[in-house]
Image (cartoon, rainbow, N blue to C red):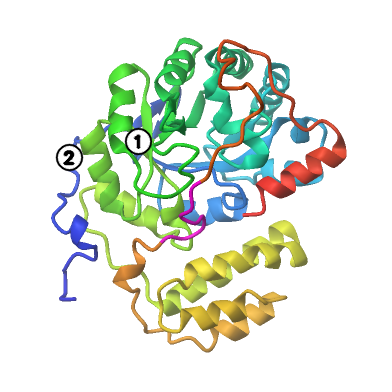
Amino acid sequence: MSAGARFSTELNADVPLARPGEFRPLRLKHLNIVPPVVLAPMAGVTNYPFRALCRQYGAGLYVSEMITARGFLMGNALTALLASSQPGESPRSIQVYGSDPKDLGLMVERLVAEGVDHVDINFGCPVRKVTSHGGGSAIPVKPRLVARLVRAMVRSAKHVPVTIKMRKGIDDELSTYLEAGKVAQEEGASAVGLHARTAAQLYAGEADWDAIADLKSHLAIPVLGNGDIWEAFDALRMMRATGCDAVIVGRGCLGRPWLFRELSDVFSGREPAPPPRLGEIAAIMLDHGERMVEFFGPRMGILQMRKWTSWYTKGFRGSAALRAKMMEIESLADLRALVAGLDGEEAFPLHALRAHRGKGTRVQKVSLPEGYREARDDDTPPRGPHLESEIAAWEAALNSG
């Protein structure tokens, strides 16, 4: 690659950088998000260590992984840890999960009292354990239930903005995003985020950016687009194609926290520098590992770090064999020993820019409670975990990464 040449795939080779004034900040009540970039809440991923690491590279809004209302209210230890923050995290953003308006109202009231600056609710989780109980991406099937949940949160949040994040619908036969978006707006939501895939798609195929544009055309509140932001230039293309007010970045930043620096650059009209070489990436990975151990403790921190080593090294020469060894690390010392043998000068491989990290490419038949599709006017909250043992199992399933 010649000096000064753009480091991008052919898809983004000619995408113009942002012009002065082309994109406005994302306004969520008192919050002014510049650039209009949001780190997607991802279970097992967007814990405090990763949020803090991403924040070092660029501005934006960095949302926690999904925090269950029952676990939070009952003082479950893992839930409390995942919901925690440290001084300097501002704005502090929490995504909550719940299907009972009373639980959500009380949870949001407590979060606001703790100083949380933004609350998002998960209406998009496609995990079978969640949808089979009528939660997550199943909730928008019932607009009156959406209304009850958003209303309870908005009333408790007061000055703090409440947003929702959802998918297009259950499958190609049952689309829910337009009606759910309108209901959320009517109940006082400050913005709506749309992952432009159905629950049946999981993370397969291409995101339907036309659906984001469709939602934007029907709502007066900000619409945040989510899906297929692998390169910083993708964010510019999405906003120009859909008219959305901000982008939500998910799998594209896994093992690539510097993507937020590149996003800050393109929104400021600057050509981003090439990604770091393997030596610098190794240093970032070690830093991340140390943060994880400090936050979760030596054992849990290293176990959680194993998946990250795969994402950081994706696409490099010999990475498959290296990842096999890294998936067996038992300590930070093990990680440092493996990193010491890397070729620090190896450049980031171009083909790794759009390499899928994290979730696979399979599809599914969405599991819903019996009769759920036919009872769309019902606003009865589905039953979630209530016993301590149920909550612990629920948290383990959702936060396994």
Q: Can the viewer see residue 117 in this picture?
A: no
Is residue 344 depicted above or below 127 in this figure? below
Where residue 325 sits: x, y (%)? 61, 81
Q: What span is colored magenta in the figure?
A: 356-363
Tell how many labels. 2
- Identify the element where label 2 is drawn: loop
Image quadrant of residue 24?
top left
Residue shown at the point (80%, 44%) measured from the top left: 392
Instruction: Report the amino acid beneath label 2.
Output: Pro
Give the image location of residue 57, x and y in percent: 42, 56
Depth check, front residue: 271 or 235: 235
Where residue 182 appears, as percent x and y from the top left, is 42, 15
Q: Give the residue type at disc 1.
A: Ala
Q: Mark 1 points at which residue?
A: 246
Q: Position of residue 164 (x, y in %)?
A: 50, 27
Q: Residues within 10 Å of mark 2 (few under 14, many from 20)?
A: few
Residue at the image point whose x is 16% and y is 69% from the top: 4
Q: Describe residue 105's horizontal placement relative to residue 274 as left or right.
A: right
Mark sitting on residue 69: none
Magenta span: predominant SS is loop
Left or right? Give the position of 20 relative to 276: left
Q: In this view, does 159 lie above or below 77?
A: above
Instruction: Please state, as top left, top right, bottom left or bottom right, where the N terminus lies in the image.
Output: bottom left
Q: Which of marks 2 and 1 is in front?
A: 1
N-term-proximal mark, 2 vs 1: 2
**Nearer to me, 293 or 12:** 12
Q: Name the residue under label 2.
A: 20
Distance between mark 2 and mark 1 Cα atoms? 16 Å
Is residue 93 visible in the rendered structure shown here? Answer: yes
Image quadrant in which you'd find residue 147: top right
Q: Compare residues 321 and 8 and report the one nearer the observer.
A: 321
Tag 1's secondary structure? strand
